[in-house]
Image (cartoon, rainbow, N blue to C red):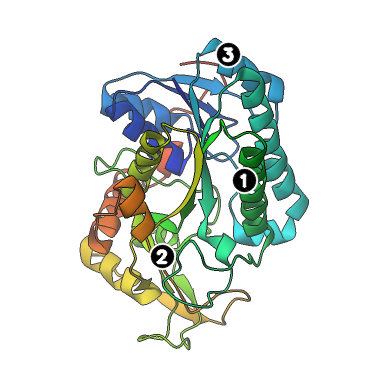
Amino acid sequence: MILLTGGAGYIGSHVCMALLDAGLDVVAVDNLSNSNKASLERVQSICGRSLVFRHADIRDEAAIYDILRCCGVTAVIHLAGLKAVGDSNVQPITYYENNVLGTMRLVSAMTKAKVKTLVFSSSATVYGIPTYLPLDEKHPLGPTNPYGRTKLFIEEMLKDLHRSDDEWRIGILRYFNPVGAHESGLVGEDPLGVPNNLLPFVAQVAIGRRDKLTIWGNDYDTPDGTGIRDFIHVVDLASGHLSALRHLKEPGLLTVNLGTGAGSSVLDVVRTFEAVSGRPIPYAIGERRAGDVAICYADPTLAERVLGWKSTRSLAQMCSDHWCWQSKNPDGYRGAEHPERSSDF
């Protein structure tokens, strides 16, 4: 049984599908603060397999310990946490409490339950401002916001944990920019309030929920003046977790990037989305945001060499799948029956 924290979220729901499709049993834990239980109901429908859901918070060590023991958990994939860079600047202590303290309590519960296999959802934000490109795992670390620092502190904590007890099997996955949705259009990204990320905002403009996109700066030293990022399809990202889990058969600690190794500009994304959706994406140019960099993309060589994993889906497919999700679910999961706060399905 695999325990998946943040299992009802955008990435969590896709990881659930990857695990279920691989024949693994899953217990998804989520406090539903920024997710919807309807995602897991759809996951089960797509996969034709059931999973166990537990409404719990990773900061509740006793609840997590009980789940670990009662469900016979053998490994944990840890996705739960707050993730908005801008919000972390406004509420840094909330981010440290949820992300760092929450992970401490999760790991403490795992230690007591003698579960010592963990795949952790980290982020490319730990690199900070690039000093060279592409970003490999040896690049200096220097996050520029509280969110990124919570990820780095957790990484360091897990390294210390492994040094103190070499029976641990730990995989640290540094995500770049997850986008897209499951090809069925039934499971996708459903942000609460104003989207913090580019593609869901673009999709909401296309569907008519928002008037226009603001592009923050068009005077970067890039071919079209807009920032370049490494966008990775969420289904490819989910398969990376399964590859990491399979790799962790022996004690050890591994840190790898999950990205495509190629960058796309903001305007690339806008034009590609217009092409696949047949909808115009009105936009305006705003001032650069503090902390934004011109170009950021991964060197995913290590993940391919060690895990046998690499991304396979193009930007066009990312946009097409995201549009399929948005067009079928113009109001996200809010069109579905409101989830009950129960302890199981």
Look at discs 3 and 1 and give the one toward the viewer.
1
Q: CA distance from mark 2 to mark 3?
A: 38 Å
Q: Residues within 10 Å of mark 1 (few under 14, many from 20)?
A: some
Q: Which mark is residue 233?
A: none
Earlier sequence position, callout 2 versus callout 3: 3
Report helix, strand or loop for mark 2.
loop
Q: Where does residue 323 sit, x and y in percent of width and height?
A: 29, 54
Q: Which mark is residue 69?
A: 3
Q: Is residue 180 visible?
A: no
Q: Residues within 10 Å of mark 2 (few under 14, many from 20)?
A: many
Q: Where does residue 189 sit, x and y in percent of width and height?
A: 42, 47
Earlier sequence position, callout 3 versus callout 1: 3
Out of 74 and 62, give the one closest to the viewer.
74
Q: Which mark is residue 298?
A: 2
Residue at x 34%, y 60% (from the top left corner): 301
Residue at x 60%, y 43% (from the top left corner): 81
Report helix, strand or loop for mark 1.
helix
Residues under numbered marks 2 and 3 in contact, where contact means CB atoms less than 8 Å apart: no
Residues under numbered marks 1 and 2 in contact, where contact means CB atoms less than 8 Å apart: no
Q: Amino acid at mark 2?
A: Ala
Q: Where does residue 64 sit, x and y in percent of width and height?
A: 63, 22
Q: Is residue 230 above or below residue 285?
A: above
Q: Which mark is residue 159?
A: 1
